Amino acid sequence: MNDSNTVGFPTIPEALLKELNNRFPEQCPELEWDSKTVWYTTGQRSVVRLLNALFKEQQENLLGGK
């Protein structure tokens, strides 16, 4: 990601990310899951990954890393 992705995006609290990572962990789908469940959980995790990346970028910008 680059700075243009974080411009105007609200600051992401670390506590929120920790909770989202706990509730929606990286995981492999179970064999019993139907395709809708697989896609639904993949979408949830995709949002958490985006927020993790934005948080990292925001932290780097705060610390003068970029």
Image (cartoon, rainbow, N blue to C red):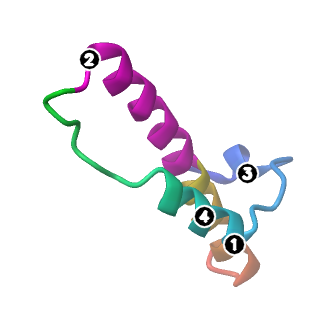
Cα gap from disc 2 to disc 1, whole angstroms: 32 Å
Residue ID for mark 4: 19
Residue at 81% x, 61% y: name it: 11
Cα gap from disc 1 to disc 4, whole angstroms: 6 Å
- The residues colored magenta run 33-50
Give the crowd class for mark 2: few <14, some 14-19, many >=20 residues within 10 Å.
few
User: If you read the primary sequence from the N terminus, does the residue marked by circle 3 or circle 1 appear first?
Assistant: 3
User: If you read the primary sequence from the N terminus, does the residue marked by circle 2 or circle 1 appear first?
Assistant: 1
Residue ID for mark 2: 34
- Residue 15 numbered mark, or none: 1
Residue at 63% x, 75% y: name it: 60
Query: In the rendered view, would you say 3 is above or below 31?
Result: below
Residue 57 shown left or right of residue 4 in the figure? left
Helix, strand or loop under label 4: helix
Viewer-nearest of discs 2 and 1: 2
The percent position of residue 52, horizontal first and vertical second, equals 55, 58
Cα gap from disc 2 to disc 3, whole angstroms: 35 Å
State which quadrant residue 25 falls in. Answer: bottom left
User: Residues at badges 1 and 4 in contact (C-beta under 8 Å)?
Assistant: yes
Q: Residue farthest to the front?
A: 32
Cα gap from disc 3 to disc 4, whole angstroms: 21 Å
Helix, strand or loop under label 1: helix
User: If you read the primary sequence from the N terminus, does the residue marked by circle 3 or circle 4 appear first?
Assistant: 3
